[in-house]
Image (cartoon, helix red, strand yellow):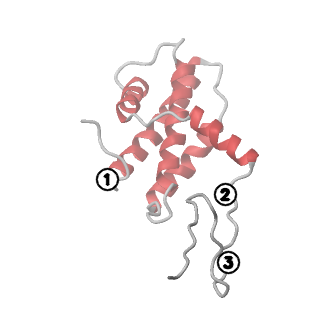
Amino acid sequence: MPLSVLVPDNDVVPPPAGEPKAPQWMPPLDADGLRLVLERIKDWEPFDVEEVFDDLDTAIGNHLPAGAATDTLIDRLRGHVKQLSDIAVADDKYPPTTEMVQLVERGRPLREERTPPNYQQAVGLARRLAFVTSDLVEALIEARYIREAE
């Protein structure tokens, strides 16, 4: 009668002698990289196309935005341009169209422009941001990168 050996479930059984060893696993990010990812996740806000349309209506609708609300409107529009630009260039499998690239490039200096202290100039900046945002939303909806509000 042959003898058999029982191996407990938690013992490691070495691979056969001729089998190549698998490379040791290395984490894809170091501690600083993980902190950066965590910060980005904490700061992330989901895309809300209805909020974008509300801000566009405020900026380029029939009525001028209120003086006190202009600074916050400009900040929100900057955020929309940034988020839409990120969506446009996010996936290498689906590169942005030439129009999208042009809009992203047109929006970059507007996002970095300081908010003017003069009300009329601030409204002008808000409207320039709004026009870029509007064109970029339309291009992304047309290309089916995002869905239109229902």
Q: Quadrant of residue 25?
A: bottom right
Image spot of residue 11 (x, y percent): 63, 62
Q: Which residue is mark 2?
A: 28
Amino acid type at mark 3: Lys
Image quadrant occupied by the C terminus: top left
Q: Quadrant of residue 71?
A: top right
In the image, 69 versus 116, the foreground residue is: 69
Q: Residue at x 67, y 77 (%)?
A: 21
Give the mark nearer the N terminus: 1 vs 2.
2
Q: Which residue is mark 3?
A: 21
Specify few, some or many for label 2: CA neighbours under 10 Å numbering under 14, 14-19, or 20 or more.
Answer: few
In the image, 125 versus 42, the foreground residue is: 42
Q: Which residue is mark 1?
A: 142
Image spot of residue 30 (x, y percent): 74, 51
In the image: residue 123, left or right of residue 18 = left
Q: Secondary structure at mark 2?
A: loop
> In the rendered picture of this protein, how many numbered marks are placed on residues?
3
Amino acid type at mark 1: Glu
Q: Secondary structure at mark 3?
A: loop
